[in-house]
Amino acid sequence: MSETVQLADVAKINPKGPPRGELHADEVCDFVPMAGVHEDGTMEVLEQRPYHKVAKGYTPFRSGDVLLAKITPCFENGKISLARTSTEYAFGSTEFHVIRPMNGDLDSRYLYYFLRQGRIRTDGENQMTGSAGQKRVPRSFLDQLKIPLPDIEEQRRIAAILDKADGIRRKREQALKMTDRLLQSAFLEMFGDPVSNLKGWPVVGLGDCAEEVRYGTSVKCTDDSSNGLPVLRIPNVVGGEVIWDDLKFASLSKKEIGRLHMRRGDIIFVRTNGNPEYIARCAVYDSEKEALFASYLIRARLSAQSNLMPRYLWMALSMPSYRRVLLRETKTTAGNYNISGSGLKSLKIPAPPLSEQQEFEKFYRRLSNGIANMAENLGDAENLLGSLSQRAFRGEL
């Protein structure tokens, strides 16, 4: 077994930016807002800004640092990334913690995979401070976090193995995205673009078609499956489907269960996220399993008289043109983007004849076995990466 040390002994937490005078005022620096760090661990530089515009009020970092989103729900969703920048210094959201390995004792990729473990994120979530919706991982959590520290060559060996497992996961994720593009093409062929509505379908409001639009529970959830019912969260809403991995559980009163239980045909929407591309991402609940849903989600239940079918509605709202409409309905608070129940109700959607929506439903179901297999393969790859990570950091790899 390797020795275990506190992270603050081998890394700088939130290191300072460039010394005074090192950068001139107009020198260009990479800039990464919260939206530039993705839940799969990737990072992209979305823009560059002159140094004098980022020197104050933003978080400095360098290539090789690990960026960790400290605010809820970005931290729980896995916004943890290894920084890759083109400029010597870069800057980003104030909602990042920056961790910089020092003295050659800690490999950046090894640290990145260590911090992305589910148990680390659960521990960090439990130590968050602040009010609901504004909770943050304190620096003290990172300072005191214990990390196994084999020699640097062993760290690099472990990171290389995890890189390969993560590469498999990414390829399977890309295959799932290609299927999504096929669905979009079929939708456009059948119905046209839902925003321009060149086919002249009658337009209805989502609020007029919904029996109810409701927020989820804010009760604290645990990993203990004996503690009540599963509670769906943002990571469970993937590709228009509910994914039954990484579940949390909670015990609620019979009255609350009656209000918040999921029913086949319900649509659940992501309500808040640090990445605007995830706002109003939705999934159709296509199961008889008992489940509840968390406060970061909104459930829409279509009425029996609705002019919209769940799978058609999901696809219409997922089209790139309609995503831009959804983004106009969002508001920002402390680095998070939000959409309200009233914002969802106000959405206007073309309503083709139900018979044609049913044809799209049949087309989707013909593809669904392939989609399910791809989703299962992706889940297997994610489980493999998780299992290898656990073994690696127990010294068993």
Image (tube, grey):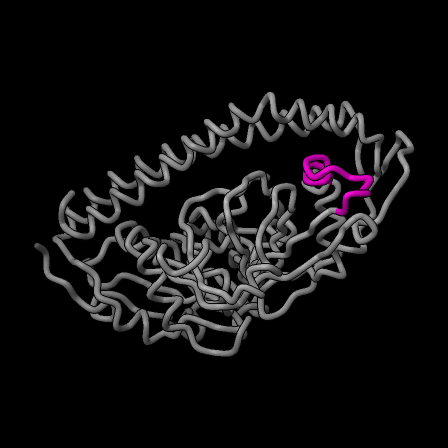
Locate the C terminus by quadrant. top left
How many numbered marks does the figure carry?
A: 0
Residue 65 in sight from this viewpoint? no
Determine the residue positioned at 58% across, 65% down. 255
Residue toward you, 317 or 208: 208
Determine the residue positioned at 51% across, 49% down. 290
Residue toward you, 14 or 240: 240
Question: What is the x, y in percent for residue 26?
Answer: 57, 64
> Is 259 inside the magenta-drawn segment?
no
Determine the residue positioned at 49% across, 65% down. 252
Residue 11 in sight from this viewpoint? yes
Locate the N terminus by quadrant. bottom left
Q: Residue furthest left?
A: 1
Q: Residue furthest front?
A: 254
Left or right of 362 on screen, residue 167: left
Question: What is the x, y in percent for residue 346?
Answer: 81, 55
Question: What is the x, y in percent for residue 41?
Answer: 42, 49
**Residue 347 versus residue 96 in the image, above or below:** above
Q: Residue furthest bottom?
A: 130
Left or right of 352 on screen, residue 289: left
Residue toward you, 88 or 204: 204
Question: What is the x, y in percent for residue 251?
Answer: 45, 64
Left or right of 281 on screen, residue 235: left
Determine the residue positioned at 73% across, 56% down. 212
- Span colored in magenta: 303-316
